[in-house]
Image (tube, grey):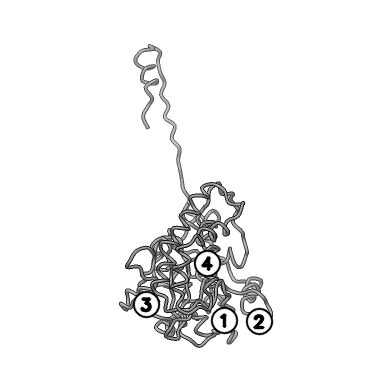
Amino acid sequence: GEPSRYIYQLGYESGFPLRRIEVGVDVNLAETAPIEVRKDEGIMQRLGRFTDPESKATLSPTAFFRYVACPLRFYFHSVARLQADDEIAEEVDAPMFGTILHAAVQKLYARVVGEAHPGETLRAMIRTGGIAAAVEAATTDDYTGNLLLVKDIVTRYLRGGVMPYDAAHDAFTVTGLEQEVAYAFPFRTQGGETAVKFAGIADRIDALDDGTLRVVDYKTGAPHLEFAGVESLFRGEGKQRLSNILQTLLYAMMLYRTRGVDAEPALYYVRAMNRPDYLPTLDDRETGVRGGRYTLYAERFEELVRETLAELYDPAVPFRQCEDADTCKFCDFNIICKRNS
């Protein structure tokens, strides 16, 4: 907003008369109009894919949370089927890192499937070079950049965190790896009773010694095990709607409803599992319960799922934008939405 030194110099030293003109730019930022997508007949038919028993389409826990977080984002992704532009990563990014870790841990734990109390086997695998070999086998030539560093980090996470934790707490038997879990969840719409076909791939399913199940989800990000009660996962402020916890509860629900056995959600945040006090169980700050199993939440959780699905399938409720800036910040469709621009 200040004249440059050159202009001052012209005025004081040149002797030429200067005529000064101030040019102002009137920046009038019009508010971005909110986007709503009405549920016409075509959209309702597309939504019908998830309830039609003859259709192969299923609703994943990720897609369900996408609706909870932002109905418009769900519309773009699961109804309109818009795809984000593929970006060529010069380095190994977070999704690639997670892919390598999941592939490596699947190779390692395939050796203990069906083995009760696999602690000794896991300790033997730690002592040998099996972990590094599994990580090496999990990578391909497609990965570039700091691949050697990533291999080393994944190996250290497994050798120093995940496997020692399981070896020290081995009152379980691995029963499934990368296993599909599915359940037709009943709910009521204006047209009557129907059921949405939930389905997803569980990283790992364990049978615990007390007869219950445990659904394990490996995470590479910062630990988030605390939540402010099951209601907050659906109706809380943006940061209270935790995708990791809501999704793992959905997996536990599917196991409970299909197998008739209670299930314990467990989130293995691999970067934190070397801590001696680490616990992978959920920490409910509303009830004060740490390690609650699904039946503790079943009644209210399923009521909230039913309410959410009834809203999703209500033709009178359009797909609307969310109000949470954090959700918009990392959305693939924020260029269209312009909510955080």
**How many C-alpha atoms fall within 10 Å of the one at disc 2: few (<14), some, or many (≥20)?**
some
| Marker disc for residue 53 | 2
Horizontal and vertical percent position of residue 43: 63, 71
- Foreground disc of the pair 4, 1: 4
Query: Residue at label 3?
Result: 291
**Quadrant of the rendering where the N terminus is positioned:** top left
Indicate whether 230 appears above or below 273: below
- CA separation in Å, label 2 and label 3: 35 Å
Farthest residue, direction top? 15
N-term mark: 2 or 3: 2
At label 3, the amino acid type is: Gly
Q: Image quarter for residue 292?
A: bottom left
Q: Is residue 107 visible?
A: yes
- Element at label 1: strand
Which of discs 1 and 2 lies nearer the camera? The answer is 1
The residue positioned 38% from the left and 62% from the top of the image is 272
- Residue under label 4, please give it: 108
| Front tag of 2 and 3 | 3
